[in-house]
Image (cartoon, rainbow, N blue to C red):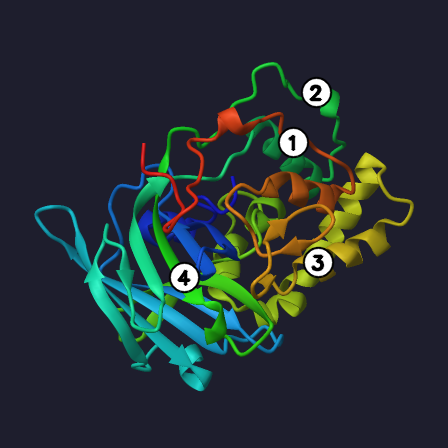
Amino acid sequence: MSHHLDSPLARQDPRLDISDVYLFRGTIGTTFIINVNPLSGAGAFHPEGRYEFKIDTDGDAVEDRTYCVTFGERDSDGRQALELSRLDGEDARDRDAAGTVLLRGTTGTKLGTQSGARLWAGPAADPFSINGAVVGAVREAVVDGKSFDLTAIDYEQPANLFAGTNVNAIVLEIPDEDFEADAIGFWGTTALATDAGGWRQINRCAHPLVNTLFYPDGSPEASDYNTTQPSQDRDLYGPLVYDLVSQAVAAVHTSDDPGAHASRVVDAIFPDILRYEIGTSAGFGFAGRNGRGLADCAPEVMFALVLNKAVPLGLDSRSNTAEPGRSFPYLAPPV
């Protein structure tokens, strides 16, 4: 899995659980996607939550702009009112700041602003694919320092864990000229209003599989990771990832210098932000990472990055729930 149900905190309310985020060139601008509520797409969006597109424009791993989407209760037709706001500068980091409302509408409808921004929210087929046997073996190698043998994986009948499942998606497309920077960083967050006032961050996501690979399922550390900020990643999580990767590549004998390889992995994933050059073709690949497209085989890239060896999933396009579309909102309809 990527970030599907990746911590005890996220599992308390799947409506706030970010399964994946994507960042790529759309038909008119830069497209950001946050998928939540994995495995079903039921339950819609949390009416007391914030769904935030965090954007770093100067490379310091701190958000300079936030697009925030909030939702109302579901009506008799299952639709929800929604509102999109933009916050800049210090306000981008302040969940109590009002921001500027860009549009209002309802889920299931393609919405747009006079400046050219577009928004759509609703259920969609989950575009993420993974072979459960492979990710389980990789996790054991990383978390437990076990040897990893590809011949032990049954590739005869590989199955996508998320075939036939849906998510709730928020798709935001911003005209390229709206960004003054040539390159940006992006991560998605969700936050929930608290009884005492203010907000509690529930989840965050950028690189796929970070929590899945480096924290045992259900560990308190997985919840802690989701409540912190990318600018803290290297200090808070760098030592742990360094130790785990060093141990893993030593166990699988894929590096003559496990420590040097582990340092490269820490540098590659922290701060946990998707970087993207505005106006270019996105690609989350072996040679380089520039955003993340809907069809990118991100798990194989992450496995190779961490273990320093190719780890095929054994899946092909037929394993996907559905092919992504070429026009906004790009995601396939729910199954």
Spatial separation of the CA atoms under disc 4 and disc 2 = 43 Å
Q: Is residue 157 left or right of residue 42?
A: right
Residue 28, percent across and down? Answer: 44, 60
Q: Which residue is mark 3?
A: 268
Quarter of the image where one finds residue 256: top right
Spatial separation of the CA atoms under disc 3 and disc 4 = 26 Å
Q: Which label was assigned to residue 152?
A: 2
Residue 68, percent across and down? Answer: 35, 69
Comparing 296 with 150, the one in front is 296
Of the numbered discs 1 and 4, the one sitting upstream in the chain is: 1
Q: Which residue is mark 4?
A: 173
Q: Nearer the viewer, mark 1 or mark 3?
A: 3
**SS at badge 3:** helix
Compared to residue 206, the image places residue 230 above or below, namely below
Q: Do the residues under discs 3 and 2 have CB atoms within 8 angstroms?
A: no
Quarter of the image where one finds residue 51: bottom left
**Amino acid identity at mark 1:** Ala
Of the numbered discs 2 and 1, the one sitting upstream in the chain is: 1
